[in-house]
Image (tube, helix red, strand yellow):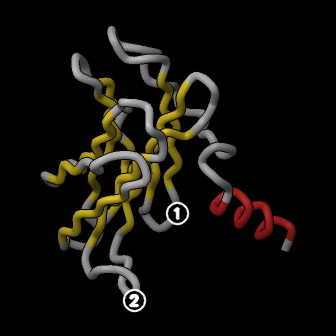
Amino acid sequence: MAGAAIITAAVFTSPAVADSNRPLAPKAAAGIPDVTFGSRAEQLGDGTIWAKNRYGDVIAEAHWQADPGGTMYPKGDTLYVSDFMSDGLDPRGEASIGIKISPSGMGDRVQKTKDVREGTRLSINLCISNSSTTLCSPGLGVNA
């Protein structure tokens, strides 16, 4: 039973605490302040990528959820992208099945749903842009 508690804690820990051991993307492109990426893949094929500023604050997040269903969520597979900071940076989430979405500013969360054949392997990433350049995370493998 102790093993189950450890797994549960890891799955539900905030991205700000649960950084994976994956290598981080390059520190900064010209014109973009220090931004690092972290990610977490979950057992059921879902996954999350987040971007942190130099102070360790999570500034944006892209989350893939396979078939969320239920009354609170749309049917199909869904990419969610959130912008958490008023920092002049623009997040964009991408899924390798042709989805590209961007929130409209701090506090905004957008989603795009596409029904994908069950078991399809795809990747998501999170990009951070300003007026002159874009920095993207490494891709994270997820399932439909």
Residue in the picture at 34% in, 40% down: 126
Residue in the picture at 59% in, 39% down: 20
| 78 horizontally vs 61: left or right | left
Determine whether 75 is above or below 101 in the image.
Answer: below
- Residue farthest toward the top in the current orientation of the protein: 30
| 39 horizontally vs 32: left or right | right
Is label 2 in a helix, a strand or a loop? loop
Q: Amino acid at mark 2?
A: Gly
What label sits on residue 70 in the rendered view?
2
What label sits on residue 43 in the rendered view?
1
What label sits on residue 95 in the rendered view?
none
Q: Quadrant of the C terminus?
A: bottom left
Expressed as whole percent of the image width and height from the top left, the position of residue 89 reads 36, 31
Reading the chain from its start, which is encountered first: label 1 or label 2? 1
Expressed as whole percent of the image width and height from the top left, the position of residue 128 reads 34, 31
Crowding near the residue tagged with mark 2, few <14, some 14–19, many ≥20 C-alpha atoms within 10 Å: few
Foreground residue among 87 and 64: 87
| 60 horizontally vs 133: left or right | right
Determine whether 41 is above or below 60 in the image.
Answer: below
Residue in the picture at 60% in, 36% down: 57
